[in-house]
Image (tube, rainbow, N blue to C red):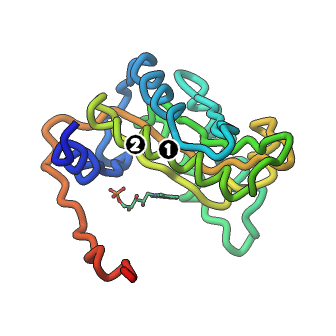
Amino acid sequence: MKYTEISNLVKTRFSWYPAQMKSNAKIPDESIWKLLELANYAPNHKRTEPWRFVVFSQEKVKEFYTELASIYTTITPKDDFDQAKVKKLQQRVEKISHVIVIVMRRDEKERVPIQEEEYAVSCAVQNMLLATNSLDIAGYWGTGKLAYSKEMKDYLNLNEQDKCMGFLQLGVPIENLPKLEKKPMSPIEDKVDWR
Ligand SMILES: Cc1cc2nc3c(=O)[nH]c(=O)nc-3n(C[C@H](O)[C@H](O)[C@H](O)COP(=O)(O)O)c2cc1C
């Protein structure tokens, strides 16, 4: 593969949000499996393969967002609680076809530092994100307090040392969307100390 092809793939990857997704449209399960297959090729130290995924599809998507709304209600202090946020979570069901919950499964023998397991899972997520466009999938990686809560860990039946690293929320892009302009990156030269 030529550098220009890889460069093009990397530079044209976009996060797409519910506003850019069709209502009540479904991604074929086979396309989700194609993403997951790529996740399985991420680099990982000592071959621990720490990525795990919990996929919600069909009516389980509704169950997932109902649970998210319930966790939000449970963990948010009264003064910060915003009913509109609950509604927003419930409304996601209209646009989101599949949710891939991203999980770091801690190696039982703890052969590598725990952050290395997270790095590997992030690489697995990037593998999936890079392929979304090619499969006509719109989506983004969502994180935050709900993902990191004990309640989410319990819901997913994770072990104490495991970590929910967020949710890939996926839908079908609206046709003929105007081409998104990627926010220009600040120059890489400013981020490199070349000695
Ligand atoms: C670790 C990580 C966590 C993220 N969490 C969120 C999030 O909670 N909510 C959200 O809207 N986007 C989230 N994003 C997506 C970013 O907002 C998005 O990647 C960024 O705006 C750059 O846009 P691009 O992906 O189109 O290049 C996250 C991305 C990463 C890598």
The residue that disc 2 covers is 129
Q: Are marks 2 and 1 in contact (CB under 8 Å)?
A: yes
Crowdedness near tag 2: few (<14), some (14–19) or many (≥20) residues, C-alpha within 10 Å: many
Crowdedness near tag 1: few (<14), some (14–19) or many (≥20) residues, C-alpha within 10 Å: many
Say which quarter of the image contains residue 72. bottom right
Camera-side residue of 127 and 94: 127
Residue 139's place in the image compared with 114, above or below, is above
Query: Is label 1 within 8 A of ligand 1 (CB to nearest ligand atom)?
Result: yes
Camera-side residue of 102 and 4: 4
The reply, left or right, for residue 144 in relation to residue 96 is right
Residue 69 coordinates in the image, percent (x, y) = 65, 48
The quadrant of the image that shows the N terminus is top left
The residue that disc 1 covers is 125
The label on residue 147 is none
Query: Is label 2 within 8 A of ligand 1 (CB to nearest ligand atom)?
Result: yes
Residue 94 coordinates in the image, percent (x, y) = 43, 35
SS assignment at label 1 = helix
SS assignment at label 2 = helix
Residue 88 coordinates in the image, percent (x, y) = 51, 51
Residue 91 appears in the picture as rendered: no
Residue at 38% of width from left, 28% of height from top? Answer: 24
Q: Amino acid at mark 1?
A: Val
Residue at 35% of width from left, 51% of height from top? Answer: 15
Residue 160 coordinates in the image, percent (x, y) = 86, 48
The reply, left or right, for residue 103 in relation to residue 187 is right
The reply, left or right, for residue 87 in relation to residue 181 is right
Residue 41 appears in the picture as rendered: yes
Residue 144's place in the image compared with 98, above or below, is below
Residue 113's place in the image compared with 101, above or below, is below
Residue at 39% of width from left, 83% of height from top? Answer: 195
The quadrant where ligand 1 appears is bottom left
Residue at 82% of width from left, 48% of height from top? Answer: 110
